[in-house]
Image (cartoon, rainbow, N blue to C red):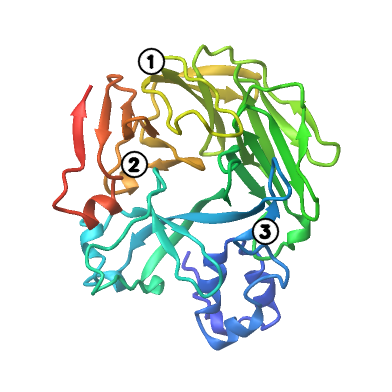
Amino acid sequence: MDREKVDWSELPIELWPKIGKCLENHIDVLRFRSVCETWRSSIPSSHPNSPSFPMKIPHPINSSIKASLTQATLYLIESTDASFGSKLDPLAPSSSKGWLIKVEEGPKGVSLRLVSPISGRKIFHPSEDSPMIWNLLNYRVIELCKSYTLQNTGRFSASVSKVVFFPNSSWVGVEDSVACCVFLEGRLGIMKHGDEKWALVDDKNFYYDDVIVHRGQFYVTDKWGTISWVDTNSLKLIQFTPPLCGFGNKKHLVESCGSLYVVDRYYETEPRRRNYFGRQENRDAAVECFKVYKLDEDWGTWVDVKKLGDRAFILGRNCNFSVSAKELTGYQGNCIYFTDMFDLRMYSLDDHSIVTIDFDPSIEKNMMPQTAWLGHTI
């Protein structure tokens, strides 16, 4: 049966605002409004009081210290017919594969900064005289996730190991947003918009390792692999899984294809937790191996995962995520990308080897083609 083609321009004008406000990501809203004058005028660029970054927030330890929350967004960039022949062609030699970029937002009027998707290092174009100019209308741009960093100065500058923020969309007011963090010594903190200081959640537990946003809620894991979600109204934890009882040194939460995973990191030596003053060296110990577990939500049990298939897990400085390796330049499936005292490395679940990578796969490799990007296998 032949489907009748529909001329989008003939749709009733009252439908455009309803369609446009179904778009949650800022980049999707921008692309929607860039199509034509009618679409642009149908919706605003965002809620008048949507979250804006850098955002001034109370410092988690000392409220007298000025602090701000910065945001970076990870995108999957895919070539289209319109992008062939552009300056970015060398970044994606195969038109069937895309690449990852991570963009850090600065104050209004300041250019966006390109940073490494894994290590968080700033990426500079080799030639300052010919900066890259990207017309994103010529590419397929997909937002994968956001990450957040607490910025401040002083002796308490290294007080938080990870912070997440939710909800954060073009149609949500900042007054409805909440931040959740894991302190360096393992406590869990939460702050609602307008609060003058952070509140502790389960202040008797000093063993939390990671926090993510999953299905619209904050999920946390402790050192035993027990996952709980945070009731932001009562500031109480609701246990979601039984203990994993993994014997690794640090647990990471990763969402992949809608499922929840715990990646258990094993160090060669036991690292000490740093205190508020960050006196211990700001590097992880050397990694020996990883073990991966998937939550079977139907049975409420943990499944030992030996194969990730085509998926690659990225344990970044500020966020964890998974990608399809076959869709990306420079990444391998069934691998975990991470940082430790040797900087950027890749762990293979196939043979349990660890490869040191001088620069991130994909974009950094191609922007600095004369630099070797793979090191030794250990």
The correct choice, above or below, for 2 with respect to 239 in the image is below
Q: Considering the numbered disc 3 on the image, is that residue within a helix, a strand or a loop?
A: strand
Residue 38 location in percent, x, y? 59, 86
115 left or right of 58 in image: left
Give the farthest residue toward the left. Answer: 370
Question: Label 3 is placed on what type of residue?
Answer: Lys
Indicate which disc, 3 or 2, sits on the residue closer to the N terminus: 3
* Residue 154 percent across, percent down from the top left: 58, 46
The part of the image, by quadrant, that contains residue 218 is: top right
At horizontal 40% and vertical 29% (from top left) the residue drawn is 308
Discs 1/3, front? 3
Type of residue at label 2? Ala
Residue at left offset 66%, top offset 42%: 215
Residue drawn where x is 52% and y is 31% of the image: 279
| Residue 219: image location, x then y, percent | 66, 34
The disc at residue 301 is none
Task: Name the foreground residue: 331 vs 315.
Answer: 315
Q: Secondary structure at mark 2?
A: helix
Q: CA distance from mark 1 to mark 2?
A: 28 Å
Q: Residues within 10 Å of mark 1 (few under 14, many from 20)?
A: few
Instruction: Give me the C-alpha separation between circle 3 and circle 2.
Output: 37 Å
Residue at left offset 30%, top offset 45%: 360
Residue 34 rendering spot, x and y as whole percentages? 50, 79
Provide the residue designation for mark 3: 56
Quadrant housing residue 39: bottom right
Whether residue 94 is visible here, answered yes or no, is no
First in residue order: circle 1 vs circle 2: 1
Name the residue beneath numbered marker 1: 268
Question: Could you say whether the residue bearing mark 1 is in a helix, strand or loop?
Answer: loop
The answer to whether residue 126 shows anywhere in this view is yes
Residue under label 2, please give it.
325
Q: Looking at this view, is 305 or 91 the one in front?
A: 91
